[in-house]
Image (tube, helix red, strand yellow):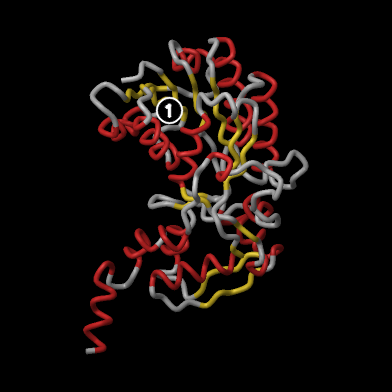
Amino acid sequence: MDARLVTVFGGAGFLGRHTVRALAKQGWRIRVACRHPHRGFFLRPQGQVGQIDVTKCSITDPVQVAAALKGADAAVNLVGVLAGDFENIHIVGAETIAKSAAQAGLKSLVHVSAIGADAESRSVYAQTKAQGEARVRAAFPAATILRPSIMFGPEDDFFNKFAGLARFLPGLPLIGGGKTRFQPVFVGDVAAAVAKTLGSEAARGRIYELGGPTVYSFRDLLAIVLRETGRKRLLLPLPFPLAILQAFFLQFLPGPLLTPDQVRLLKTDNVVSPTALGLADLGITPTTVEAEVPSYLWRFRAKGEYANLAAEKNRA
């Protein structure tokens, strides 16, 4: 087995589990750094015995970050939040990892940001993502930055969320009229991009924007959710001002469904720039939404995996 060691910050999360699997297949030894180590123990069987280890680490603590990077050849930062302490996670944490990686003499750093990172955005999420990129670039100039669009996959927080809401709501909200455009990218393709760029001389210092093969409107994506779950629901236009008002109250729920900052983020399209490097430049053929989403949204159908069988029986 290759003796290279990579520290993956946020390896126990949605993107993390797929990234750890991809890196393990490449032969990397992997140290998963996360705040709650017990949540990462499920990753160990994805590699050979002893190939994957888990360590406790808060990315805002320079001492813990340095310890997590000790002896490593490379690092990957996957940590990000859609709501909460943007400044500490997206800026302070990202800078702490980059500075520690530089001080430790690491050969490679991959930093996962997001499409829409923009210091001039009205969204704090987008602002802090851009500021985090700048801090990483200043501390570790050769870092590779990946900017994925919204990611889909079995554990995603987009298709699963709206499929869950469709179970009990008579209609789904089309925030801003449902016109915002997205270019969803399969989480496995993003993980493959991390594995491809890590340690790649050609990827050093570059930015890649990662999107799927198709651009959809927000309305299109909700229509896919309803089609795959076999539910008939109204798609109700919700103007941005009203969405902001509703989000003000929803943000106080545990695991908030919607925040005002997320509404502001929806005012900007989330698609790959036509001039940006992307999956094709890494030799990755993007997976379509239609090929992957049905494989996990079936559980939201009224009769689950037997929905089609029940329909055929009724027609007989």
The residue that mark 1 highlights is: 35
Q: Quadrant of residue 247?
A: bottom right
Residue in the image at 53% along x and 31% along y: 197
Which residue is at the front of the view, 265 or 52? Answer: 52
Does 291 sit left or right of 83 as displayed? left
Q: Quadrant of residue 163?
A: bottom left
Outermost residue toward the right?
120
Compared with 23, 261 (above or below) is below
Q: Quadrant location of the N terminus?
A: top left
Residue 30, given in percent of the width and then of the height, sits at 37, 24
Picture coordinates of residue 234, whole percent (x, y): 52, 77
- Indicate left or right for 276 with 64 as reference: right
Quadrant placement of the C terminus: bottom left
Whether residue 137 is visible to the viewer of this picture, yes or no, is: yes
Residue name at image x 45 percent, y 27 percent = 8
**Image x and y of residue 137, in percent:** 67, 25
Q: Residues within 10 Å of mark 1 (few under 14, many from 20)?
A: some
Task: Say which residue appears at 35% left-offset and 65% top-offset.
Answer: 300
Q: Secondary structure at mark 1?
A: loop
Q: Is residue 215 above or below residue 210?
A: below
